[in-house]
């Protein structure tokens, strides 16, 4: 009988091992013909979001899209709630978990090399007394996103500070919590400090007071039994994008503009949204109906140019809410630059013309940002900057490169050899970066609307040419 029991035990061991291999078998390597790259993620400003037009955005989203493009495959996103992420990571239905994650402690879930480094921080209203040491958290209540690294960090702190109260919130996003904090509805929020500059655009009265723990790497998690080839390709991809500038360009897309506005700038803009924008919104929305240019972008351009002053006039003669030159106004057949309806519509048409003037291979959002730079310095100077970029082996189709080239137009060693002469290219960079921030703020406070009516005869810019 003993040998029978041993045989049964051996058979059960083999069976369980086989079941384990089956349960945790990796997904097949993604191939163009058969399998997409399956990415586990969650919603958030750093991970995966959908804009008003239905387009997916986010730093981690763009990274995984770039990796999938390198593999020649599509991407299938599994978007889960933050509180469900720990359980889903234990499964085997994904290739990559890209959700601003750090390596899991006491786990055999594999991770890539670090992509970024980050740290958890405590945020409070700047009207409250700042905390200076962790012991001061005693008796305090801290709000945090459920299932986040910050929530786990605070639970560990509770072992040392038992009367620290932690409220894990499963609804909304971190910006919702920060807005509550700014309004005085809650006292403290724990968040990733990578969001600090983004958060300050939306809620200017925040104070980052305490760091909660050590710096942490941000990685992609590959599961317990990752496909060996896929893991090797992911590691090689991360190494390459860190060396060739791809990662720096993607970071610039999401963070490159967020340090331009100071607290006073944001407070003033938020006040103008309440007081001045309601009277002007119809002009921006009608211009969108006519041209297809997002009305919030037009409002952002107008705010940077004139602070929404319909009678604005500069010493150089540019006038109106969109600060059009007399030459541009004549070309666009504007009879009165101080008429906000005419000015906004002409500004929208001019932006479209400048975008049309760029090569077809220039992609969004760079296409819009480059057009805005040309709006500021004029197409002649802008095209001179593009030629200078080519001479300096920079990419004239990428805002990341052109924001470095444009300021050179004010230096004699560069502008003296250009037919167009000197230009204040640095101001064009500031304009574009500020407009990006204003647009981000408006996009959060002013949801896009369906503008069904299109104004006859104004859907494009027929017959108009921009001088090169």
Image (cartoon, helix red, strand yellow):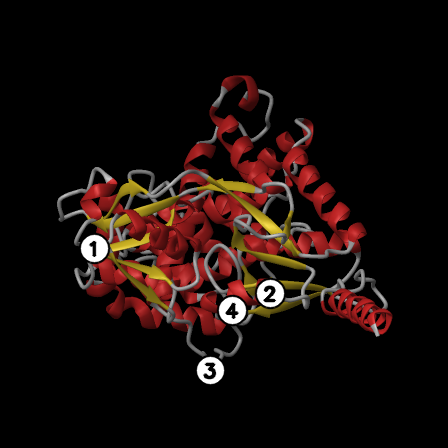
Residue denoted by label 1: 163
Residue denoted by label 4: 292
- Looking at the rendered image, the disc whose residue lies closer to the viewer, 1 or 2, is 1
Mark 4 → mark 1, Cα distance in angstroms: 55 Å
Residue denoted by label 3: 453
- Determine the secondary structure under disc 1: loop
Which corner quadrant holds the C terminus?
Answer: top right
Badge 2 crowding class, 10 Å Cα cut-off, few under 14, some 14 to 19, many 20 or more, is few
Q: Residue at x 74, y 55 (%)?
A: 69
Mark 2 → mark 3, Cα distance in angstroms: 20 Å
Q: Residue furthest bottom?
A: 452
- Determine the secondary structure under disc 2: loop
Residue denoted by label 2: 462
Position in image of residue 289 (x %, y %): 46, 74
Badge 4 crowding class, 10 Å Cα cut-off, few under 14, some 14 to 19, many 20 or more, is some
Position in image of residue 199 (x %, y %): 34, 52
Asked if the residues shown at circle 4 and circle 3 are in contact, with their CB atoms under 8 angstroms apart, the answer is: no
Mark 3 → mark 1, Cα distance in angstroms: 58 Å
Which corner quadrant holds the N terminus?
Answer: bottom right
- Determine the secondary structure under disc 4: loop
């Amino acid at each position: 009988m003993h040998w029978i029991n041993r045989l049964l035990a051996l058979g059960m061991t083999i069976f369980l091992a086989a079941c384990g291999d089956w349960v945790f078998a990796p997904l097949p390597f993604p191939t163009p013909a058969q399998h997409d790259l399956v990415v586990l993620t969650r919603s958030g400003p750093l991970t995966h979001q959908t804009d008003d037009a239905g387009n997916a955005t986010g730093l981690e989203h763009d990274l995984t899209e770039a990796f999938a493009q390198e593999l020649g495959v599509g991407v299938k996103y599994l978007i889960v709630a933050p509180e469900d992420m720990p359980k889903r990571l234990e499964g085997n239905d994904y290739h990559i978990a890209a959700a601003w994650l750090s390596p899991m402690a006491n786990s055999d879930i594999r991770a890539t090399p670090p992509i970024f480094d980050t740290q958890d921080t405590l945020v409070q209203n700047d009207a409250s007394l700042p905390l200076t040491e962790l012991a001061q958290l005693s008796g305090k209540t801290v709000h945090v996103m459920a299932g986040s690294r910050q929530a786990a960090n605070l639970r560990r702190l509770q072992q040392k500070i038992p009367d620290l109260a932690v409220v894990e919130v499963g609804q909304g996003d971190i910006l919702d919590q920060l807005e509550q904090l700014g309004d005085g509805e809650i006292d403290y929020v724990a968040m990733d400090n990578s969001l600090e500059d983004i958060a300050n655009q939306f809620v200017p009265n925040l104070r980052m007071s305490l760091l909660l723990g050590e710096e942490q790497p941000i990685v992609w998690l590959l599961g317990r039994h990752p496909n060996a080839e896929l893991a090797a390709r992911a590691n090689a991809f991360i190494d390459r994008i860190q060396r060739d500038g791809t990662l720096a360009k993607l970071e610039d897309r999401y963070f490159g503009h967020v340090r331009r506005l100071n607290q006073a700038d944001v407070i003033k803009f938020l006040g103008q949204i309440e007081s001045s924008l309601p009277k002007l919104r119809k002009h921006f929305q009608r211009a969108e109906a006519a041209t297809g240019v997002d009305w919030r972008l037009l409002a952002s351009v107008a705010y940077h140019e004139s602070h929404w002053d319909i009678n604005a006039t500069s010493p150089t003669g540019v006038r109106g809410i969109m600060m059009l030159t007399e030459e541009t106004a004549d070309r666009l057949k504007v009879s009165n630059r101080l008429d906000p309806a005419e000015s906004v519509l002409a500004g929208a048409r001019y932006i479209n013309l400048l975008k049309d003037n760029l090569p077809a291979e220039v992609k969004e959002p760079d296409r819009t940002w480059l057009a805005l730079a040309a709006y500021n310095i004029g197409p002649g100077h802008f095209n001179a900057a593009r030629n200078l970029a080519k001479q300096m082996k920079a990419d004239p189709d990428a805002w990341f490169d052109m924001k470095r080239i444009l300021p050179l137009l004010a230096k004699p060693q560069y502008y003296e050899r250009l037919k167009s002469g000197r230009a204040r290219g640095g101001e064009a960079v500031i304009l574009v970066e500020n407009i990006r921030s204003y647009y981000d703020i408006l996009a959060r406070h002013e949801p896009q609307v369906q503008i069904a009516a299109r104004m006859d005869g104004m859907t494009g810019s027929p017959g108009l040419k921009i001088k090169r």
